Amino acid sequence: IVLVEHPGEELRTAAEEAPSDPRAWGSLCRLGGSRMDFLADRGEDPEPVYLEARAACENALIADSGRAEVHADLANAHKIWAEAQMARELDAGATLERAADAAARALELDPDSATAYLQLGRALLQQVRYDYRRGRVSEATLERAERALRTAAEKDPKLTLAHSNLGNLRQEAGRHQEQQGLDPAPTYARAVA
């Protein structure tokens, strides 16, 4: 596998040459999310890429604030950065809030977007994990995450991330129930349903 030192240079150039075209900026935002995942998986610092991805999303939204997919991409970038913050034991609360807000905005613009529901569900799943680590539990957040992920899966049954994140969500809920001395069997059973 050959890794490009600076992926997206051609996109960045295209975006800078036509700053009012949201497509190149949106593509840079999506690319940034992928790069952040890659760096985080390798244990490397994704913050510089997060800042680039966020700026690209914001430029795309300046060019055309009505693009639901860019709001969903921005939600994803915030969610990935929140994961990195949590791995470092940093406060990720504000970042998770921004992720959920961006996904909610995407849904306002396109209420049929499976991707926007997925990003909302993933942001809320991260919020659930964040809350559990701090000894807080929000059943409302858990239920919102499940609704969003189920809706994403219903709108696009081939969206595997929706299905896998539903399973992850139920596992988190089951672990919490175990910690409280409750029987997690019904929760785990729902994870595979």
Image: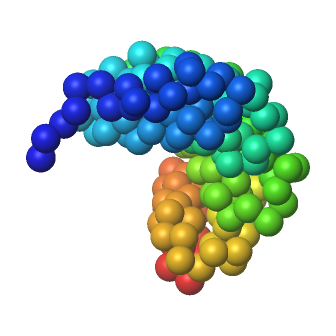
**Residue at the image position 67 percent from the left and 41 percent from the top:** 70
**Quadrant of the drawing holding the C terminus:** bottom right
Residue 33 location in percent, x, y? 47, 38
* Image quadrant in which you'd find residue 135: top right
Q: Is residue 136 above or below residue 156?
A: above
Image location (x, y in percent) of residue 123: 63, 44
Picture residue at 67% right of the left edge, 35% below the top: 22
Q: Is residue 139 left or right of residue 189?
A: right
Between 166 and 140, the residue placed more toward the observer is 166
Which residue of the protein is positioned furthest toward the left in this rendering?
Answer: 1
Q: Nearer the viewer, residue 66 or 154?
A: 66
Report the residue that reaches farthest toward the front. Answer: 17
Residue at the image position 68 percent from the left and 48 percent from the top = 69
Q: Which residue occupies the extreme bottom position in the image?
A: 193
Tell me the residue at 53%/40% (across/down): 27
Would residue 161 be seen by someone viewing this image from the given angle? yes
> Exactly how many numbered labels are in the figure?
0
Q: Nearer the viewer, residue 101 or 65?
A: 65
Q: Which color mode does the image show? A: rainbow
Residue 190 pos. (x, y %): 59, 77
Residue sticking out furthest to the right: 108
Q: Is residue 92 visible?
A: no
84 horizontally vs 23: left or right = left
